[in-house]
Image (tube, rainbow, N blue to C red):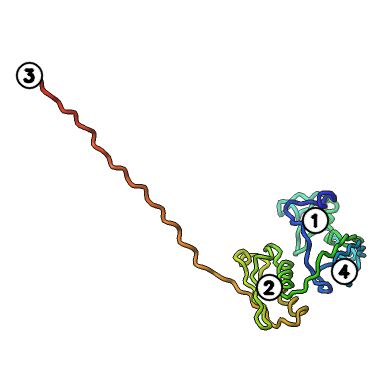
Amino acid sequence: MAKEEGIYDEKVVFKSQPIVIGAGHVLKGLDEALVGAEVGEEKTVEVPPEKGYGLRDPKLIKVVPIREFKRQGMTPVPGMRIEADGRVGKVQSVGAGRVRVDFNYELAGKVLEYDVAVEEKINKTEEKIRHLLELHFKSIPPNDHDIHLEDGKAVVVLPENAKFAKEAQLAKLLVSKDVFTFMEDIDKVEFREVYERPAPPEKKEKPKAKEKKSPARKKKTAKKK
């Protein structure tokens, strides 16, 4: 599908996304359209800018002196993306020593169209938590987490690769927030990180030194004359 639409990117994993309807996991317009949707239902949803990425703001279009780019060793050209003050902008035009940069989000002001399909509805508490982990720990396969339920407490044992994920701290907060908001039977979420002693390296047998054999001495026989 992605290849057919011309949006395929080998660095992006294209798969179904778990969400909690009404939790704001997707754009407001899409979230509202999914309320009451049944498993197996497919629909096309049109999202206006007001319920998508917002309207374009003329105040976010800035004119920057070209010398500011040159100070950083950059040569601005139309279409070039830059980052300034934590915002990403796109160069619109260059001329007369000035550069016009648009810091509006690229989808702001646009009507968006989504084709959506509801694949399944999750009912079991453990599976709900696993899907929330998949949603917020984007770089970790959901089945890598070990989940235990203990009298109103959910214990999540994080896999080795989650310890170093850049989104780990925020992801734990977001998972906990969603659990407390949408699961009345869970009052505590505990994340555990297990560290194990690495196995000692296998000792390699040193190759035995070969014994040097002294060259055989030839016996000299004296001949009698």
Q: Quadrant of residue 25?
A: bottom right
The answer for how far apart the CA atoms under marks 1 and 3 are is 111 Å
| Most foreground residue, 79 or 72 | 79
- Which of the pair 64/116 is nearer the observer? 116
User: In which image quadrant can residue 15 be found?
Assistant: bottom right
Q: How far, Cα to Cα, is label 1 from label 4?
A: 54 Å
Residue bearing the label numbered 4: 38
Residue holding disc 1: 65
Name the spot of residue 150 as percent of width and height, x first: 65, 80
Instruction: Locate residue 214, reporting x and y percent.
Output: 23, 36
Query: In the rendered structure, are the residues bearing label 2 and label 3 in contact, judged by CB atoms less than 8 Å apart?
Result: no
Q: Earlier in the sequence, mark 1 or mark 4?
A: 4
Marks 2 and 3, the one that precedes in the sequence: 2
Residue 101: which numbered mark, if any?
Answer: none
Cα distance between the residues tagged 2 and 3: 102 Å
- What amino acid does circle 2 point to? Lys
Which of the image's four quarters has the C terminus?
top left
